[in-house]
Each structure stands twice: as structure tokens, then as C-alpha cells.
Amino acid sequence: MNRKRWTALFLVLAVFVLGIGVESIFGGIRNLTDHPEYAWDEHVVSGSGTAKIVQLYVNGTITSERSTASVTPMADLLTEQIRRIEEDEQVKAVVLRIESPGGEVVATDELHRRLLRLKELRQIPLVVSMGSTAASGGYYLATAGDAIFANPNTLTGSLGVIFTLTNYSNAIHKLGIQEYAIKSGRFKDIGSPARPLTEPERQIFQTLVNQSYDRFVDVIVKGRSLPRERVLQIADGRIYSGEQAKRLGLVDRFGDLEDATRYALTLTGLPEAQIVRFTENISLGNLIFRMQRYWSNPDPLGLERILQQGSTPKLLYQFIP
């Protein structure tokens, strides 16, 4: 039994030491292409020829915040993948597959701008394929597309902004707890959960929400060539089915990922192309890097982040039932 314990301990220490070595090596790397966190292979799904059509995936909540020690934020991954597409002259079109309820306003807007820059820089078509959910910030990204495909049952819409604050002032009052804020200005503790929200504070937050909402309306107007008055009518936060969205002019066609990819090929004017996806590179360096990151993290399960979620409110382009 003791021998087994010593063997297990030795293996753990070996992995940790190797991880530190990998960390020190990769810490000095400036090109993300060589970093284990951004190491992908190109997987050819189908097709032939030298030209490529890349199927790019937006999965889950759009965020730039790291959820756990071993998971890279989705916005960071997409940003690096977009950069690689920009540098690859063989890529002739991109199909953006969206399976997302949206997410952070800033992360969503930054990705949207990068998609527009990609189209302008490379002069290539971008076709959007919606999955079961492509709502709020998911739709925000979709407006960058030259065409939007959806299933009649896709959940989309939720066009708007939400900003939530947690308040427990009544609870702490009943418990006899007092919190004092020594502040430099009237609004320095704006949104404090320990006291009721004042009307001037509510107006400040509402102004921020309205500004982000106006930006959302702008990208729909420009991306979908719809009158602003019409967009204001339909962008009231409600959820739409794909069928409803098509009638409203938010979606162009019904179809799945393959339909969207075939349409992208027609836009290139080419007779054939390789259909390519980015897949995570499976290597010893990648495994050691992730294990080292996990074990060196003081909160590997993310419990502290979960407990503190309500303490940092954010503007969200997100469908939240």
C-alpha cells in the first residue's frame, strides 16, 4: 500500500514539475499560434481542391471571462480562429454556426467587429447557420452575415439588453446588519446590494442600457437593411421562432449547416472547396499545460466564481428566461 502511495505521489509531482517547465517555456511566447491553449488542427469535413470554406462555431455563452482554470473563454478562441482565417489566403468563405443565447455586451460587440473586419480585409462571404438557439448576442453576431439560415423551430430574437442587480437590503435589515460605505462621490457605491436603489441611480443604469440597445438596433438596421422604425417595433426583447423571424426579415432562408455551406460555396463562384473545421490539437504539451493550469489554480472547481457571480453586474445581450 505504501509503495502505491509513493508511486502516485511521484506521478503527481512529475506532472506538476513538467507543467511548471511548460509554463515557463510558453510564458515567453508571444505568438499564440504556438501556445497549447490555442493549438488546433484543421479537420477536412468534406470536399476537395485547394480552396477552403471554414465552418466556425459559436457555442455557449459569449464571454471573455475564464470560467475554470482549464477552459479558455469562447471569445478568445474565436478571436484567434478569426485571425488565422485572415492570414490564410486559401479560405474563400466562412460559415458561422451559432448555438448561443448571447452573452456579454463588450465581448459580443468585439467579435462582431472582428467578423466585419474579416469580411472587409479578405473580401470573402460570411454565411450564418443558426442552431437550436441563436438569440440576443447570438443574433447580434448573425447580423454580420451575408445570409442567415435557420430552422423553423430555432429560438432567436430576444433583441435587447439586460442588466441585473441583486439586492438583499431587506434581509440584512432584518438580521440587524449594517454596512457603511465611505465614498468619494455620491454615486461611488451605485447599485450597492446593501441598500435600496435610488431613482437617480436607476436612471444612470437605464441610460447605459439604452446606449447598448441603440447599438444593437444599429447593427440590425445596417446588417439586415431594415428601416429603423421597423427594428424598434420588433426589438422589444421577445423571443421568436425561426419561422417568425423569417417573416420579420431577421432570417433569410430555412436550412441546416450543410445548406448554409453549399450556399457559401455558390457565393465564392468556385466549383469545389474543402470544408474545414478547427479541432483541438491533442498533444502531450497541451495535456500537461492544462493539467498544470488546473492544479495551480486556487479555485479549480470555480466555486468562488459561482459565489461571486452576483457581485459584478454586467450589461448583457443575452436571452435569460
Image (cartoon, rainbow, N blue to C red):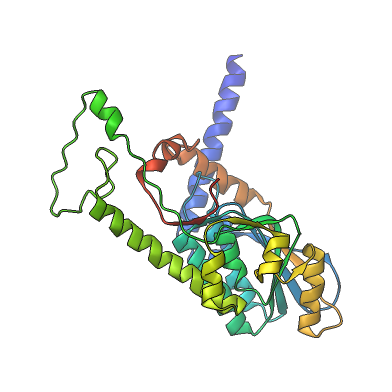
Q: Residue 5 location, x and y as percent?
A: 57, 20
User: On screen, 141 above or below 174?
Assistant: below
Residue at x-position 27% and y-position 46%: 197
Q: Residue 161 location, x and y as percent?
A: 46, 58
Q: Residue furthest top?
A: 1
- Please state if 48 lies on the left or on the right of 145 as rendered: right
User: On screen, 165 above or below 29?
Assistant: above
**Is residue 114 something one can see in this rendering?**
no
Given residues 214 and 36, the one toward you in this image is: 214
Given residues 94 and 68, the one toward you in this image is: 94
Q: Quadrant of the C terminus?
A: top right
| Image mark count | 0
The image quadrant that residue 122 belongs to is bottom right
Q: Residue 314 location, x and y as percent?
A: 40, 53
- Please state if 134 lies on the left or on the right of 48 as rendered: left
Residue at x-position 39% and y-position 60%: 209
- Please state if 265 lies on the left or on the right of 222 as rendered: right
Residue at x-position 56% and y-position 39%: 15
**Is residue 13 something one can see in this rendering?**
yes
User: On screen, 82 above or below 315?
Assistant: below
The image quadrant that residue 311 belongs to is top left
Q: Residue 167 location, x and y as percent?
A: 33, 39
The image quadrant that residue 98 belongs to is bottom right
Given residues 169 and 244, the one toward you in this image is: 244
User: On screen, 113 above or below 320?
Assistant: below
Q: Quadrant of the N terminus?
A: top right
Given residues 54 and 104, the one toward you in this image is: 104
Residue at x-position 53% and y-position 60%: 75
